Amino acid sequence: MSDVTVVPADRRVFVDKQSPGAYKALLAAAEAAREAAAAAGLDRRLIELVNLRVSQINGCAYCLHVHTRAAIREGETSQRLGVLAAWRDTEVFTEHERAALGLAEATTSPADAALQDAAYGVARAVLGEEEISAVIWVAITINSFNRVSILSKHPVRPAPAR
């Protein structure tokens, strides 16, 4: 017999709706991170790759749904989206993108000091300081959105047939 009570998905609190002030602050932080990324010269397609890779690591279905559509709108290809989880084993990402993806992964797994040191070393060799800061802030904000969506159990429903 277990003492764990399972809460059905339809009984979860949508924390973004329950605490709109906190959610608006998170939205503002994400907007500031996107602005910093644009000011650093990072294109929106790369930002969406970072959002997707972090969401893959965290297993956030809702954010994967949202940011896959956003990446496609920005011109991302199905090949690159399909292999993003294994980006290290491909030749389809630029050195710049690889540095950003590694840094985003290190931001998502901060307890792994070796991963963090290695990713930061690559990032320092390839990205400027403004780019490094922007990638880290984008990764921090999408990690936060992942937690909101995962813990709220935001639904992903089938898209309407075309």
Image (tube, rainbow, N blue to C red):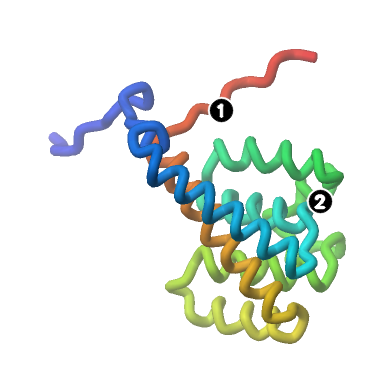
Label 1 CA crowd tier, 10 Å (few <14, some 14–19, many 20+): few
The numbered dot on residue 156 is: 1
* SS for dot 1: loop
Q: Which numbered disc, 1 or 2, marks the residue closer to the eye?
A: 1
The numbered dot on residue 52 is: none
Task: Name the residue carrying label 2.
Answer: 80
Say whether disc 1 or disc 2 marks the residue closer to the N-terminus.
2
Q: Quadrant of the C terminus?
A: top right
Q: Quadrant of residue 8?
A: top left
* SS for dot 2: helix
Q: Is residue 136 left or right of residue 48?
A: left
Q: Mark 1 belongs to which amino acid?
A: Val
Q: Nearer the viewer, residue 113 or 127?
A: 127
Q: Mark 2 belongs to which amino acid?
A: Arg
Q: Position of residue 136 (x, y in %)?
A: 59, 68
Q: Position of residue 122 (x, y in %)?
A: 70, 81
Q: Nearer the viewer, residue 27 or 102?
A: 27
Q: Residue furthest top?
A: 161
> At 49% across and 67% down in the image, what residue appears?
109
| Tag 1 and tag 2, C-beta contact below 8 Å | no
Q: Position of residue 50 (x, y in %)?
A: 67, 57
Q: Is residue 52 left or right of residue 75?
A: left
Q: Is residue 28 left or right of residue 159?
A: left
